[in-house]
Image (cartoon, grey):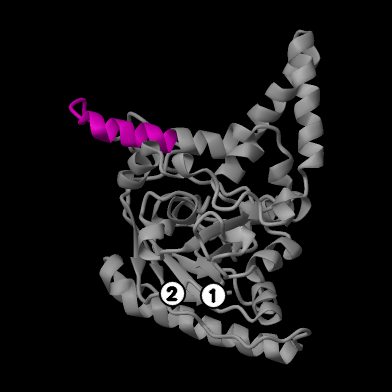
Amino acid sequence: MGKIEWAPLNVPMRRRLETLSTALWMWLILFGELGMLISYFVLLIYGNLFIKTLCVIYGYFIYTDRKITLNGGRGQGVKWWRDLFWWKLYQSYFPAKLHKTVDLDPNRNYLFAAFPHGVLGLGAFINFATNATGFHEKFPKIRSRPVTLNFHFTIPFFRELLLSWGLVSANQNSIMSLLRASNKPEHPLNDDGFTANAVVIVVGGAAESLHCRPNNYTLVLRKRKGFCKLALKTGTPIVPVMTFGEVDLFDQPPNPPGSKLRRFQEFVKNTTGIAPAAFVGRGFFQYSYGLIPRRKPLNTVVGAPVEVSQVDEPTNEQIDEVHERFCRELDMLFETHKSRFIADHKNVKLVIE
């Protein structure tokens, strides 16, 4: 074990609060689901009659509300929750910034394909699940709708947090309902003042986290074409999104393909769907080890839409053509902006696997 670099004692209170907000978010994402699931069953089994009754009613509510995430969720979520000052602390910890390259028409829906996933997709969360980086100011009238696996919405209490952030199920029907939603201001779905949806998919998913280490922009994209098929079926433009710095937040032990660690990680991923990245960040009072991401800048660049024709039943050739165009645009976006955000940019390339 290397020498531990301790944090100085005279750190300003603002920076301490930034670190605390980031640490609590990590604990919430890593352990919140299990903790809330256990808490629910403990209350259900050991609570008094009143508590048990509430748990039964809430369990019935979850069952009857189970299809909400397949039908657009709860719109843009809860405004005060997305605007919470706590997320501004989280945003300024790195700091995280959102960069717009072109204006987006609020009379169209969009499919944002975001990269890289990193360990937990921190850039995608702060930019598209909260208002901390000014998404609504940069893209007025457009809702940001990140997607995640549907099973997360079955966890008591935790599901309400996801819905309050505006998240929705990654189920195909759910995504298509958002992409096909009306853009007319008078439509009932738009009575919240928005007229368009930007469905945010972190395409590489958990598999991409196994590549996560500083300056390693290796994307799991070559065989991921489902988002192109959805775009074709709905005639929705695909917007490339790249977060520079996402891979710099954590490190992990060497795990090249074929190594014992990588084989174990692949086995767990194939068995459970969860990729156990052995990531190393920093702690609250020291900078060498821990679960908190390192304080590195996150710069998310939203590129120009890749236009797609509407095809009810797209062929493999049509899907491949859109996928190839998207990959070219994503690489161009990376090459255009990497000199602004990567110190050793001449030696860093985008690798698509």
Q: Is residue 144 magenta?
A: no
Kind of residue at badge 2 = Leu
Residue 108: percent from left, percent from top: 54, 75
Residue with the most extreme left position: 10
Specify whether 233 is left or right of 12. Answer: right
Q: Can you identify the residue that label 2 sits on? A: 104
Q: Residue at x 70, y 68 (%)?
A: 176
Mark 2: few/some/many CA within 10 Å (<14, 14-19, 20+)? many
The label number, if any, that marks residue 108 in the structure image: 1
Q: Residue at x 21, y 30 (%)?
A: 11
Residue 74 visible, this angle? yes
Residue 46: percent from left, percent from top: 77, 11
**Position of the C terminus by quadrant:** bottom right
Query: Quick check: 249 above or below 309?
Result: above
Residue 28: percent from left, percent from top: 54, 35
Please say if the residues under marks 1 and 2 sit with CB atoms less than 8 Å apart: yes
Give the quarter of the image for residue 93: top left
Mark 1: few/some/many CA within 10 Å (<14, 14-19, 20+)? some
Query: Quick check: 20 above or below 348?
Result: above
Residue with the most extreme front position: 186
Relative depth, front residue between 154 and 10: 154
